[in-house]
Image (spheres, grey):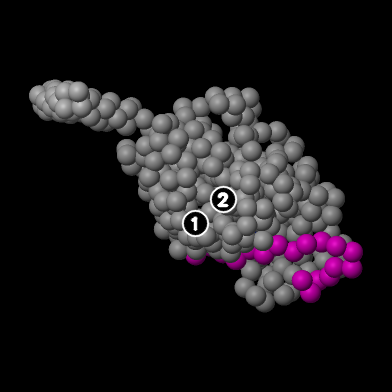
Amino acid sequence: MIKKRMLMIVLGLLLITGCSSSNEPANELKAEAKTETAAAKTKQKQKSLPNVKILATGGTIAGADKSKTSTTNYRAGAVGVDALIEAVPEMQDIANISGEQIANIGSQNMTNETLLKLSKRANELLASDDVDGIVVTHGTDTLEETAYFLNLVIKSDKPIVVVGSMRPSTAIGADGPSNLYNAVKVAASKEAKGKGTLVVLNDRIASARYVTKTNTTTPDTFKSEEMGNIGVIAEDIYIFNEITKKHTKETDFDISKIDKLPQVDIIYGYQSDGRYLFDAAQKAGAKGIVFAGSGNGSISDAAKKGAIAAVEKGMAVVRSSRTKNGVVTPSQELEKKKLLASNSLNPEKSRILLMLALTKTNDPAKIQKYFNEY
Ligand code: DGL
């Protein structure tokens, strides 16, 4: 009985192995065909998807810490561009992604040199048929300055999107991956074409001209307070505002041959400020000064003496406002002294525009025109 059962088992095993070995070539062929179709499909998909290049510069979006609860004490710029891309594989479904590391720093350490390097590389890439859009990853602290600089010097209609995050990649509820995914979505979209440099964080699309950081730590820190955002991302892209200020291809600025930007400093206005601040800037080599005045760009009598002396020495002085919102209107009295008004640019963006303006002219009237147009 036992012998009979053993025989049955052995026969059964032989049958199973026999069956499988006789079907092997057919199965292999099927598997090969499947792989080939999948590869063809991927190729086809890759062809039809836009090519988005990520230029990484560091910041919290590339920040890391040992603790998952650490959202303020972490190292910014700790993770490279490849790790950023690997962390969000879903991006590959909406674009062909590749990356380049331009820098890996906290954006408080962004310099004019790195700004020029980034912008020149972005222009070079956007001029190529192989690139349909660019995403720049950046620390949030000075993100608006870089974004506005790109808005003035990029010579392409193709989308360029600057993105950051407020929580490091290792934190609970890190906002980097979703911000990056959204930024790629916008950079790969038709809707973003011809809109100048855009800033994407917290599901919002903002123009580099208007957006500013308003809060030290919260994820909803970027606001375009006076003008509103230009759109939102709710899976799809919804654009609801137009940009009226000149940008990208429409500007006068060509950085292709510029290796050094003129020094422009910002002086903050306050009670009991004085002329010595302007004298110090001039001694340190400034070619222009932005005065972050109180209210509507007000300047104290003491500081005004410094500002007028600076203009007489050939420097450009632009009044902006420390309130960060609203228009700094021209003042007849100050205009006569050739003190310019920033229009609605905040002090840090006024510095960016004044540096570029000074690469073209020292004429106060022409510089004022730039401030009114850009
Ligand atoms: N200091 C920082 C930076 O701007 C970290 C802040 C951030 O990216 O949110 O790189």
Residue 34 at x, y percent in the picture: 22, 25
The reply to whether residue 355 is visible in this rendering is no
Which residue lies at the image location 44% right of the left edge and 45% below the top edge? Answer: 85
- In reply to whether residue 89 is colored magenta, the answer given is no
SS assignment at label 2 = loop
**Residue 97 figure quarter:** top left
Residue 373 at x, y percent in the picture: 63, 41
Other-residue count near label 2 (Cα within 10 Å), few / some / many at <14 / 14–19 / ≥20? many
Front in this rendered view, residue 320 or 174: 174
Front in this rendered view, residue 351 or 174: 174
| Residue furthest front in the image | 1
Residue 260 at x, y percent in the picture: 49, 65
In the rendered image, which residue does mark 2 sit on? Answer: 169
Q: Main secondary structure of the magenta part?
A: loop
Q: Which mark is residue 298?
A: none
In the rendered image, which residue does mark 1 sit on? Answer: 79
Which residue lies at the image location 40% right of the left edge and 48% below the top edge? Answer: 99
Horizontal side of residue 36 vs 366, given as left or right: left
Which one is earlier in the sequence, the residue at label 2 or at label 1? 1
Give the amino acid type for the residue marked by disc 2 in the picture.
Ser
Horizontal side of residue 338 vs 127, given as left or right: right
* Image quarter in which the N terminus is found: top left
Horizontal side of residue 132 vs 232, given as left or right: left
First to last magenta residue range: 260-277
The reply to whether residue 297 is visible in this rendering is yes
Which residue lies at the image location 72% right of the left edge and 51% below the top edge? Answer: 217
Image: 49 above or below 146: above
Image: 98 above or below 60: above
* Image quarter in which the C terminus is found: top right
Give the amino acid type for the residue marked by disc 1 in the picture.
Val
- In reply to whether residue 272 is colored magenta, the answer given is yes
